[in-house]
Image: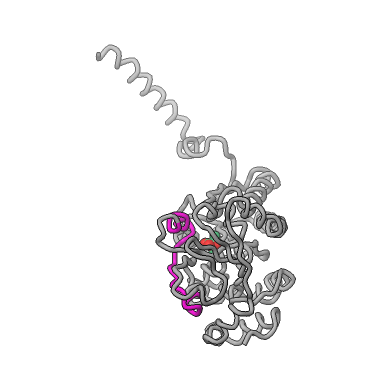
């Protein structure tokens, strides 16, 4: 036994010695962890989106362009589909610098930057003709300034999540009264909870990575999301009805950890921001296309669509004092920017 062992032990000793001798020129750590990468900056981007969702597809394209155009100096590794945890976990990772880039709904970001949920005020934006000028303009800048005060950097162009619709397994939601006592999942955000409480529903905050199983096990009877998410995450497998409510518009901020972003040389900062902003516009166009094609596709998969009267839902919110309450929370400056974009809400 010792005879068979000896040669290999010697070989091992030799190769180790050889490696150690070379280690002044090439650090061992670099050889082991990133054999093929000569990148100067290796950063991580994480999201909650399924692989087939335009957010992941277009972000992946931007990352590829950034690598090419930087001559390989900037290598961003993508961790989609909640691989690194739920949104609130990933937000902590972004803040600590464990990840450097992350896309997050403004409404969830509001747990850190309160004004970031303002675009989600119920029935505020009539259509995309109101959304993009506001988010690319004064309202978006106002929110971004507050984000920047919290150690995070938000790129100028927001990505589209979409207008949200309510799905359910137990009964169709046709009128606001149907929401009374309805057990609905909402993303973790005070605005979402407040809005569904105003309807008399029973909202539970759950990160997106647990939504499918929460619906499957009937922990909740419904949830609300844009069509593109319902399709990409296959929520139609565990839901029967979709109420077309368009009750809020939701978008993703493309966020960077400010320290990590500032550590990049100016040319890489410019490149990274330009490419992610360009992909944001591609992604907006993808979602617009999906909005017009997905109803048929989802119906074919068995989801029953129910049309609703938005004015009736909005009237309930108004009567409950929802708008007044949130106007006070955001303050006159922010609310004024929202109303400048969408008209009077009170
Ligand atoms: O968590 C959700 O419902 C989702 C996927 O729409 C968000 O990112 C807010």
Which one is nearer the viewer's eye here, 86 or 15? 86
Query: Which residue is found at the position 68% from the left and 56% from the top?
Result: 290
- Magenta region: 196-215
> Can you say whether 68 is above or below 295 in the image?
above
Magenta residue check for 197: yes
Residue 97 seen in the figure: no
Picture quarter containing residue 219? bottom left
Q: Where's ligand 1: which quadrant?
A: bottom right
- Residue 246: % across, % down: 63, 69
Magenta residue check for 342: no
Name the image quarter holding the N terminus. top left
Residue 94 seen in the figure: yes
> Can you say whether 29 is above or below 327 in the image?
above
- Residue 49: % across, % down: 56, 54
> Can you say whether 268 is above or below 166 in the image?
above
- Residue 37: % across, % down: 57, 39
Picture quarter containing residue 102? bottom right
- How does the figure colour the protein chain or chains? one colour
- Residue 277: % across, % down: 69, 59
Q: How many marks?
A: 0
Residue furthest out toward the left: 1
């Amino acid at each position: 036994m010792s005879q068979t062992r000896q040669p290999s032990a010697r070989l091992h000793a030799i190769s180790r010695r050889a490696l150690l001798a070379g280690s002044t020129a090439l650090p061992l750590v670099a050889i082991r962890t990133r054999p093929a990468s000569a990148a100067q900056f290796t950063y991580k981007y994480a999201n909650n989106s399924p692989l087939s969702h335009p957010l992941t597809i277009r972000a992946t394209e931007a990352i590829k362009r950034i690598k090419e155009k930087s001559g390989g100096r900037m290598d961003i590794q993508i961790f989609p589909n909640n691989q690194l945890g739920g949104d609130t976990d990933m937000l902590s990772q972004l803040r600590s610098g464990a990840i450097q880039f992350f896309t997050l709904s403004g409404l969830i970001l509001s747990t850190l930057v309160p004004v970031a949920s303002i675009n989600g005020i119920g029935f505020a934006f009539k259509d995309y003709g109101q959304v993009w000028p506001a988010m690319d303009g004064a309202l978006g800048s106002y929110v971004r300034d507050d984000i920047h005060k919290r150690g995070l950097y938000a790129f100028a162009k927001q990505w589209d999540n979409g207008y949200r619709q309510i799905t359910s397994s137990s009964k169709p939601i046709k009128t606001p009264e149907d929401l009374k006592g309805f057990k609905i999942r909402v993303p973790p955000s005070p605005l979402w909870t407040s809005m569904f409480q105003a309807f008399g529903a029973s909202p539970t905050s759950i990160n997106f990575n647990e939504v499918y199983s929460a619906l499957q096990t009937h922990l909740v009877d419904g949830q609300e999301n844009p069509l593109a998410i319902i399709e990409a995450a296959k929520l139609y497998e565990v839901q029967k009805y979709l109420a077309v409510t368009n009750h809020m518009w939701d978008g993703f901020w493309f966020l960077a950890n400010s320290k990590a972003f500032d550590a990049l040389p100016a040319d890489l900062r410019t490149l990274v921001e330009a490419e992610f902003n360009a992909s944001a516009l591609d992604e907006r166009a993808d979602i617009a296309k999906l909005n017009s094609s997905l109803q048929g596709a989802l119906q074919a998969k068995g989801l029953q669509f129910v049309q609703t009267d938005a004015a009736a839902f909005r009237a309930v919110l108004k009567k409950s004092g929802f708008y007044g309450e949130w106007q006070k929370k955001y303050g006159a400056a922010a609310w004024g920017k929202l109303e400048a974009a969408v008209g009077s809400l009170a």
